[in-house]
Amino acid sequence: MTDGPVVIVLAAGRGTRFRACGGQGSKLQADLHGKPVLDHVLAAVQRSGLAHHVVHRAAGNGMADSIAAGVRATAAAAGWLILPGDLPLIGAPSLRQVAEALTQQPVVVPTFQGDRGHPVGFARECFEALADLSGEAGGASVVQRYRRAGQALLLPLDDPGILTDVDTPADLQRVRALLAAGN
């Protein structure tokens, strides 16, 4: 078993909404200040010092399929932080804070100004539930199960990057403007 949780970076999505809104190619490969969106996410993960695994392909087409593939590929991990690859403004300190909070509760959901974001953290005890996921719903069913049992922590963070994803070309423009402004 690894010492800490592994960040599972989800990069297997089809990005249909991005293309449907006029985007060209993959949103994760879209240029964001000289490098792909995904590279910004991976740089934050590397700065966090946490181990990571990138899911480029999964058996199914949904987010839950990607989560299950990543968790199964890192079965020896002490836990997992599930991070979509389209959050280029995520801060490394946020990743570390979610990882640290997993020592308090088996599920950690970061929030910014009351809105839930990513990465959602899951302790080792969640392995079977995560490994069995399939479909589009991501890990929501696991989070709900632990919330009902009073075992999920909502963790307020001072990082709007936990919410700032790139789903459309307009989102990409907004993120470019935020980066240019130094946010």
Image: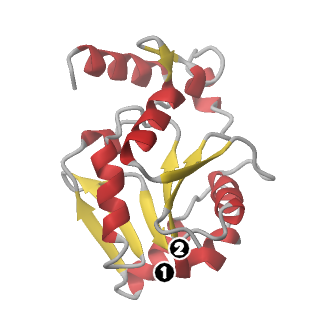
The residue under label 2 is which amino acid type?
Answer: Val
Q: Position of residue 26 (x, y in %)?
A: 63, 23
- Label 1: how many Cα within 10 Å (few below 14, some 14–19, many 20+): some
C-alpha span from label 2 to label 1: 5 Å
**Residue 13, image x and y in percent?**
66, 39
The correct choice, above or below, for 166 with respect to 149 in the image is: above
Pointer 2 with pointer 1, Cβ within 8 A: yes
* Numbered circle sitting on residue 93: none
Which of the 4 image quarters holds residue 173?
A: top left
Q: Is residue 96 left or right of residue 84?
A: left
Residue at left 37%, top 63%? 99
Mark seen at residue 142: 2
Q: Residue furthest right?
A: 59
Q: Is residue 175 left or right of residue 24?
A: left
Disc 1 marks a residue whose amino acid type is: Arg
Going 78% across and 52% down the picture, which residue do you hit?
60
Q: Name the spot of residue 139 as percent of width and height, x first.
A: 55, 64
- Residue found 27% across the figure and 56% down from its top: 111
Residue 145 - label:
1
> Is residue 56 found left or right of 130 in the rendered image?
right
